[in-house]
Image (tube, rainbow, N blue to C red):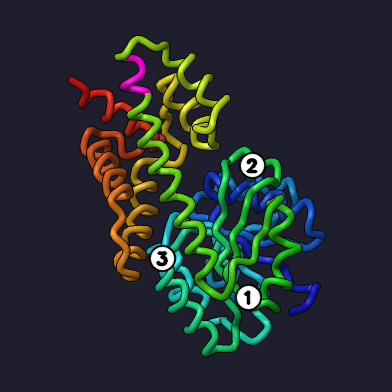
Amino acid sequence: MTDAAPIGFIGLGVMGEPMCRNLARKSGRSIIAFDLDPAPVTRLAGDGVAAVAALAEVGRMADIVFLSLPGGKEVEAVVTSALLAHARPGQTIVDLSTSPVALTRELAGQLAARGADYADAPVARTRQAAETGTLSIMVGAKPHVFQRIEPFLSTFASDVTHCGDIGCGQVVKIMNNMIIMENVVALAEAWAIGRRAGVDGKLLFETLTKGSADSFSLRNHGMKAILPDAFPERAFSTEYALKDLSYALELARQNGVPVRGAEVARQLLEEAKAEGYGANYWPIIARIVDAAAR
């Protein structure tokens, strides 16, 4: 790896664009980027990010390549169709997406056969956190690879945790998402019960923040989405939530752990999708819980 080589960034969606912007502003390195949508690439040009015409060009030119993609299917396609052919000693591919653990380790093995390193570094928190550079990142990587990429991750994250070897970052992120989804199921049920039992919904949630039920899920998903009944598109959708939860269920099966709470969350997400809410912000499952009340 040389400081003269650019850093590559593939995937400039809701989270990718602000992460790439912070990387360009703070890393002191030249950045090249690719996305199927030309709009974010155009916006990032003002921060000195250079567009490339093809995915393979990112792999050919960059010694560190960040991926911010919808999920494992897309990550596998990009790595195998565009990056693997250019993989080489000294190059590092960093997956910022939430991807299956088994796939992560498989791709790492394929890249290692060509001398390249791989790290899983899924991000947590919100788009606002991506914009302010205060994401939390869980990293699975060899120690020397973590040391190499941590300064760049810190341009868009305030918390960067080395969780262990390849795949361990994904394990922690997938468990993080599973816990949040189960928490939101509980919030949706409390919301439906409390209002029917005579308690104002706003008062209910505000009071819960003052006790042991307080949580990020309550303050973010409960107060900002369930309370105002606001579940916009262009947020983390029901379909994306189902994808991430499927990774948790797969990991649970692989390790012989029954996950009844996660199965309830999956059922509610499936019902929300069937009701036409697949593109809406996923805490819309609160509407499903509420509608089921008799």
**Percent x, y of residue 275:** 22, 33
Q: Is residue 114 in view? A: yes
Residue furthest to the front in view is 212
Q: Residues within 10 Å of mark 2 (few under 14, many from 20)?
A: some
Amino acid at the residue labelled 3: Pro
- Residue at point 67%, 76% (across, down): 145
Q: Is residue 167 above or below residue 155?
A: below
- Residue at point 54%, 86% (across, down): 112
Earlier in the chain: of badge 1 and badge 3, it is 1
Earlier in the chain: of badge 2 and badge 3, it is 3
Residue 271 part of the magenta segment: no
Amino acid at the residue labelled 2: Ala
Mark pair 1, 2: CA separation: 25 Å
Amino acid at the residue labelled 1: Thr
Q: Quadrant of the C terminus?
A: top left
**Percent x, y of residue 36:** 48, 54
Image depth: mark 1 or mark 3 in front: 3
Mark pair 2, 3: CA separation: 24 Å
Judged from the image, the secondary structure of the residue bearing numbered disc 3 is loop
Earlier in the chain: of badge 1 and badge 2, it is 1
- List the residue tagged with mark 3: 100
In the image, the segment drawn in magenta is 191-195
Q: Are marks 1 and 3 in contact (CB under 8 Å)?
A: no
Q: Main secondary structure of the magenta part?
A: helix
Residue furthest to the left in view is 294
- Residue at point 55%, 28% (across, down): 211
Q: Nearer the viewer, residue 290 or 213?
A: 213
Q: Judge left or right: residue 94 versus residue 26.
A: left
The circle drawn on residue 129 is 2
Q: Is residue 57 in view? A: no
- List the residue tagged with mark 1: 92
